[in-house]
Amino acid sequence: MSMDRPELTTEEVLRRDIPWETYMTTKLISGTGLQLLRRYDNKSESQRAALLDDDGPAYVGVFVNILRDISKEETIEYVFALIDEMLAANPKRARLFHDRTLSSSDTYGPFLKWLWKGNWFIQEKSCKTLSLIMSVRPKYKVGVLSNGKVANEKSIFTSADDALKGLVEWLCSQLKNPSHPYRAVPTAVNCLATLLRETSVRASFVQADSVKLLVPLITPASTQQSIQILYETCLCVWLLSYYDAAVDYLATTRILPRLVEVVKGSTKEKVVRVVILIFRNLLSKGAFGAQMVDLGLLQLVLSLKAQSWSDEDLLEALNQLEEGLKDNIKRLSSFDKYKQEVLLGQLDWSPMHKNPGFWKDNITNFEENDFQILRVLLTILDTSDDPTALAVACYDLSQFIQFHPAGRIIVSDLKAKERVMKLMNHENAEVTKNALLCVQRLFLGAKYASFLQS
């Protein structure tokens, strides 16, 4: 696009005089179309509102036909300005584009065409309009058209689903290679913050590998404009945090430290709220909980709670986050306690050994330092003469085999079999019982061992 001319505004464009008659003589506009345009053009907002109330779909039909059939830039800009003004006055008018009387024409195709072809004024208007049209589209059952007929033959028109796909593709391309130096990214983020409410859009967005393009935009903001784009970016991330594939992707980025910095540096309640809601959603997913504890999020939550916020949702989310983080800390510290017990060689039947929750929550912690804790348990089997410690060590190895997906292989590789089998002849009944359980799990796997145990 040419950057040499100053930014166009809707007001400026609407001052133009468009020679509609010449389009009619060249058959680019029908007689009815010309009548409607004459009636609508250069009228006051209240007159236009009355015309749209009476005959909205007919006017929308004429606008869409011009976008489809005419290629002169000044005219296209003018029609986009008319549509922009009409929707700015009343966004509910976007529903007119879905009116049944328009179902025999390609309503969405022209918008997609101008997204890729137009200058920035046209691209921006086309993207904002199409986003609004898509966000109010009626949801029909699959295979049933709006007019109640069943869809079996392929329509020559762009379907709403295809239009939505094309729009998301364009928005993603703008995040990657903006076609305007400072307006393209805020525009794209603004539209995505609405569209990502839909699962299909979240899927397309992740497939387009666009999650990573949002992360750099999460940075403390000071100006009014940068606060707004930060807020809308966080809104996108919040909507994505309900979608597992996006969460998996976020886990590979440095998003948490960035969000923490944003909350520390933000006084805007809406920004703080949306980030806290993201934290709440991510808390139970993968390694996010442990990462939040490491980042000192609990202290931040407590200091936020001490401030006076008016928003009930925010206060509730802060309470839930505090509770969840404290749980995480307890879980982490229960493993620390366990580690201490093992490393000191002082094993006894403290409650965590027989608590399935402890094993489920902490099973991956056993992988630390090349399975250090398992190696120490085996050393205990070799060196300890305390029957309780021996029994507990056998029991813990059998728990590890049960709860870790590769438990049997790992424990076998560490040469545990011989050591445990030796203990099956131990004079202490508790030791032999737990050694037997461990051997059964090693040879038979968890399913059969629990069957034998019952």
Image (cartoon, rainbow, N blue to C red):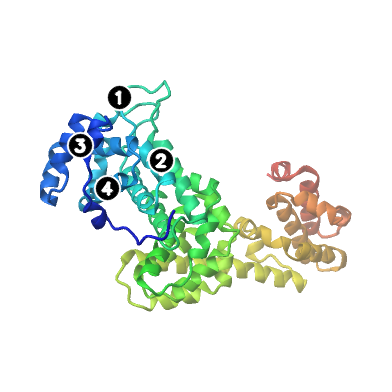
- Who comes first in sequence, dot 4 or dot 2? 4
Q: Secondary structure at mark 4?
A: helix
Q: Secondary structure at mark 3?
A: helix
Q: Are marks 4 and 2 in contact (CB under 8 Å)?
A: no
**Image location of residue 144, percent across then percent down:** 35, 26
- Who comes first in sequence, dot 3 or dot 4? 3
Is 428 on the left or on the right of 147, as rendered? right
Name the amino acid type tagged 1: Gly
Cα distance, mark 4 to mark 1?
A: 35 Å
Cα distance, mark 4 to mark 2?
A: 16 Å
Depth check: give the residue in front, 320 or 259: 259
Depth check: give the residue in front, 429 or 48: 48
User: Which residue is disc 4 drawn over?
Assistant: 78
| Classed neighbour count for the residue bearing mark 1: other residues with Cα under 10 Å, few (<14), some (14–19), many (≥20) | few
User: Which residue is disc 3 drawn over?
Assistant: 21
Image: 407 above or below 256: above
